[in-house]
Image (tube, rainbow, N blue to C red):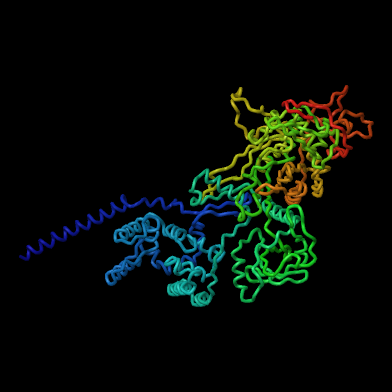
Amino acid sequence: MKAFIWNLIRKLLALLFITLIMIVVGVFYYIKYQLPDIDVLNTVQLQVPLQIFTHDGKLIAEFGEKRRIPIPYSQIPQPLINAVLATEDQRYFQHPGIDIPGLLRASVKLILTGRKDEGGSTITMQVARSFYLSRHKTFGRKLREILLALKIDHKLTKQKILELYLNKIFLGNRAYGVAAAAEIYYGKQLNQLSLAEYAMLAGLPKAPSALNPLANPDAAKKRRDHVLGRMLELNYIDENAYKTAIRAPLNASYHELQTQAKASYAVELVRQQLEDMYGDTIYTDGFDVYTTLDSHLQQIANDSVNDNLIAYDQRHGYRGPEKNLGAPQLNQMMEWTKELRARPLINNLEPAAVIEVLDQSVVALRANGSLVTIPWEGLSWARKQINADYLGRLPKKASDILKLGDVIRITSIQKNWRLTQIPKAEAGMIALNPQNGEIKALVGGFSYQHSKFNRMVNALRQPGSSFKPFIYSAALDKGYTLATVINDAPIVIENPNDNSLWRPQNDTHRFYGPTRLRDALIHSRNLVSIRLLGLIGTNYAVSYAQRFGFLPSQLPASLSLALGTATVSPLDMATGYSVFANGGFKIAPFIIDNIRNTQGQIMYQAKPLSACTNCDVPVVPFPPPVKPATPAVESAYAPRVISAENAYLITSALHDVIQHGTAIQARSLQRNDLAGKTGTTNNQVDAWFVGYNSDLVALSWVGFDQPQSLHEYGAQAALPMWIQFMQSALKGQPEHSLAEPADIVSLRIDPLTGSRAPDSDPAAITEYFMKDFVPKEEEAQPAAPADPTSTTTPSDQQPTDPPGNQIGPDGQGIY
């Protein structure tokens, strides 16, 4: 009997041993072949938000639900590591991924209470759960978690596992990972925190919402102190460090992402382009996108638009308060501040309520509850706007402007408070590098918060006289010269569709008789421009304008095109003017320079076609042939669309616009390398100025979204904005003008007739010509450099009688 029992025991032990072997083999097989591949954790891509930067590295925006800043283990401060290990996994560097004593304690607790708590989970098990498993608590998931932890610990170093954990964990308030949490709660980089702050972060993984220092400061402090106590017990800190840290105040507060430059309209343009390129993954793949924007130019563009639109708005009077809250009472101040906080801050124009009106000042309540005094210097501008055409009397005291309870807008300028108002008109500015198309600054409106419509890129407006240089360039290409004389006299044009008559006029309502084209462009003579377009032909002009990037659908094939009745975006105009600025090359504007992934590898690099002023590049035929005679050779250079001589002559005339013409205010910049053109549309609906040197093209625009008269010309509304921008943009920069091409000839001409004049004529002036279109004489005068400022004379000639009937090449009658 005893032998039978021992034999049975031996068999049972053998069976048990075989079973254990099978279990071990099964577990090994499951770990090796059935569990997920752990190697991917070495190159795992955490969800990281999209960040957008200026070209000089200033952060301007971040997109994504999760704020995360992945950092390597070597950059994680040791006090934080100690704090995390002390509270989460004190035997982390000793166990193989699972902590047997901890699991046993959790098992006993399960047997005694019947509750499946998270107890016993090591950091490695938490990594396994967060990367591979759901948070649904089951015995099967727990077993997989244990097996995964063993596999992870076998495959990865302890340092790598801890790095994954500290970059992955959720710590509340959109903070994922310890580096993002340091910025959100303390506004600091991770290595700048104190011991008490490290302990606070280390205590958050247990319950990031319940133990959050912003939502529950008392619970957060208790948890922080518990972490500090554990660090003391485990000898991570000494008694003095513990006492210092335990007494530290709870100084956590929410810190918004601190951007370093403001470019909301540009950012949205970039975001849309990225979405088109990569889809929705841009918000989680951690792209760092570097734009072409220059942070300095962007800031002065912001300021120029803001300052000059407010100045325009105030020139047209005060429209009154946004609301009146009634007579102020002390017990109503809380309600008043609540009312003010509900109103958005728009471009530093903050809401306020008038609580006291003195003789020549008022006291106003701000949304934060403080009081400010607005002196007379900040009030006296506010003449009442009767309507768009009339203003009321000049105010003599504060009560002429405001009354108690008025909800107004105020702003601080050099620590002095001023009354202001949100402009009804809009404005924008764009600046390009004409050599390669980089967008250096972009302001699409007064306030992105107030209106997200990007007027520089998406608005189609009439450019007015700022379109004239393209017409004059077309004429030069057809053999006309800046010395060509055309009569500035009344014109009547019949519309064959309804037999109505069009009688265009100059803005001065005067006629100036025979006028050289240079003077006509300098002083923006409408009637000369219309006659010139009639002579060259509207169909030809529409075709020629396409060289600058305009589409036929934007350009009416009628004589009104000479006055800028095209429908174009400001970006189109800036791109077109870049052709003049760079000497004749058509560049393509772009705003994304390069895109980098989380490892810093360049995924995309812009390769713009650049102007090459020193290259002997012929003008491309336009429109290009359907089938080129020879295969196109790939080039790094932009196509030449007009000759260098044409670009030089138009720039010379536009230089004189600033020196002697409609943009003479810009002479205040005291530079000799600037050229540009004002633009005002019919009834003064749009105001423009486009100006440039060879390094920078800048455009300013002012108008209403719902077209109505500005009651100002481009020289009044748009030019000051451009001047303010260029004043700072070009400060300290050397002058850079177009070099005079070899085929430009300078001659002395009669300023009245435009014909060749003898050198001895004291009234003669210098004009520039293309070599092929020099006025015919027995001997041509050799080319000689001259000061382009001497090429014009005043054209305020006495009115003359209109010319006889002329018929333009397109068949339209000019009377």
Residue at 77 percent across and 66 percent down: it is 376
Q: Residue reaching furthest left? A: 1
- Judge left or right: residue 71 versus residue 316: left
Q: Quadrant of the C terminus?
A: top right
Dividing the image into 4 quarters, which one contains the N terminus? Answer: bottom left
> Which image quarter: residue 473?
top right
Q: Is residue 137 left or right of residue 798?
A: left
In the rendered view, tell whether residue 690 sits above or below residue 191: above
In this picture, is 220 found above or below 155? below
Instruction: Specify the quadrant of the image occupied by residue 345.
Output: bottom right
Name the spot of residue 742 as percent of width and height, x first: 78, 30
Where does residue 488 sit, x and y in percent of width and height?
83, 34
Q: Is residue 51 left or right of residue 499?
A: left
Which one is in front, 494 or 649?
Answer: 494
Q: How many marks?
A: 0
Residue placed at 76% from the left, 43% from the top?
Answer: 678
Q: x and y percent of residue 407 in the render? A: 66, 65
* Residue 118 lies in quadrant: bottom left
Point out residue 69 in the picture as x, y percentages from the top left corner: 51, 57
In this rendering, does residue 618 appear at all?
no
Residues 49 and 570: in front is 570
Q: Residue at x 36, y 57 (%)?
A: 134
Would residue 808 be visible to someone looking at this image? yes
